[in-house]
Image (spheres, helix red, strand yellow):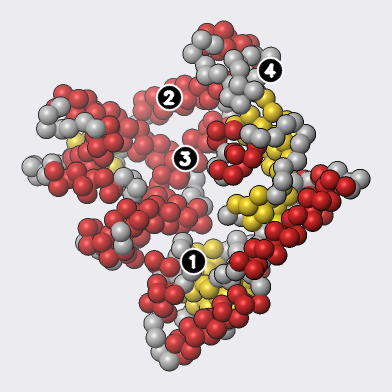
Amino acid sequence: MKKFLSIILLINFIVIANLYPQQVVDKIVAIVDDDIILQSELLQFSLNLAFQYKIDPRLEQEKFAELQDQVLDNMINQKILLAKAEEDTIEANEREVENVLDSQIERMIQQLGSVEKLEEYLGSSLGKIRRDFRGDVEDNLKVESLKAQKMQKIQISRREVEHFYETMQDSLPDFQETVDISHILLTIKPGDDAETAARKKIIDIAEKLRQGEDFVELAKKYSEDPGSKTRGGELGFFKRGEFVREFEEAAFALQEGEISDIVKSEHGYHIIQMIERRGERINVRHILVRLASTQEDASRAEKRINEVYEMLQDSQKDFAEIAEEYSEDETTNEQGGHLGKFTVEDLQEKEFKRVVKTLEQGEVSKPFRTRFGWHVLKLNERQEARKLSINKDWEQIEQWALSIKQQEELNKWLEELKMKTYVEVK
């Protein structure tokens, strides 16, 4: 792990490095077993954190020096943990590596404005940027997996939780207002007009491919998959079971370089190109044309949700039975539409937050729309904001106490590993 540079913080470094250019020749600042930490690495991380903490290295030199000491300690610890992870033969899940790398690079592109600007800043093609930083992402995931394995073995007794509460109760936050909610969702399904438009667009793209136009460039221009279009449609390596059935059947049937016919899935129309096969895993790129719903489609879904709402008012069936029969939220319909318990302020959908504040316990809302479709919402239970109580909030207090114990035990274990590791700070 020679760079050990967090991808998502790189943008901040690019900005601040121009303000505080490196003045010295690169040198080794620490040795950890057979690995090294370079001064340039230390400076990169320190400048990133200084930028976040609004520390000016030129005007606040003492603070910046303290920050560098902390950063160096953290970098040494990370290298020690990585060595242990490799000793224990911990592997990073390749799909997870690709997902993390995808999301981080996508955020970098969004911050800079385009792929071209990112390539210009880093002086590399997008493909080389991915290859350069993939190792860092993989190493970080190995370390996190090692930590998770260690922490899973740490348990906490009832007496320890009680002692934590007795010691910390004045510092613990108040219990926020929470709600337990269920819903019925009816999605807005594209009708015939949307189907016709999408079909025409994907046929036109297929014709361009037949005429010899480049798949990557067409994906960048026409694909409606925001997660892959900036990479020319490339999805990264995956195995069976990670994508929808229709897509996988077509993708796994391809030979390297081969392009599929038009494939329809629940997401829309695809054209797929095989890039590489590694045993049971493949890497493909695709062009996606989604089925864009119309106002007529939305109105049709609204009519159906009103019918369901009337059913809830008149039927002898309870909410859970109707949700199981009619809700199109596949993650909750088998549980009678039960979404779970949430802090009101943490509800991500503004409409959910607005509607839930108007409901009494046991009440069902009138239909309302979000980006997911049309809903009716049931408030199963509301707990008002209040002071924490060890009797009422045992699980939450236990989790806080366990988290602190896990961190303390992790720190002790790290010190033990340090005693067995050669570390030299230059």
Tag of residue 392: 4
Marks 1 and 4, the one that precedes in the sequence: 1
- In space, the residues marked 3 and 4 are separated at their CA atoms by 32 Å
**What residue would you read off at disc 3?**
144
Q: Along the line of sight, which residue is nearer the eye, 128 or 268? A: 268
Amino acid found under the numbered disc labelled 2: Asn
Amino acid found under the numbered disc labelled 3: Glu
Which x, y percent locates residue 92?
Answer: 48, 50
Q: Is residue 55 above or below residue 114?
A: above
Amino acid found under the numbered disc labelled 1: Asp
Amino acid found under the numbered disc labelled 4: Lys
Image quarter in which the C terminus is found: top left
- In space, the residues marked 1 and 4 are separated at their CA atoms by 46 Å
**What residue would you read off at disc 1?**
225
Which x, y percent locates residue 88?
Answer: 49, 41
Residue appearing at x 50%, y 22% in the figure? 404
* Mark in the foreground, 3 or 4: 4
**What residue would you read off at disc 2?**
411
Determine contact: label 1, label 3, CB under 8 Å.
Answer: no
Residue 2 can be seen in this image:
no
Q: Is residue 271 above or below residue 359?
A: below
Which x, y percent locates residue 41?
Answer: 23, 43
Q: Along the line of sight, which residue is nearer the eye, 218 or 7? A: 218
Instruction: Examine the image and state in which quarter residue 51 appears.
Output: top left
Local crowd size for mark 3, using a 10 Å CA cut-off: few (<14), some (14–19), many (≥20) = some
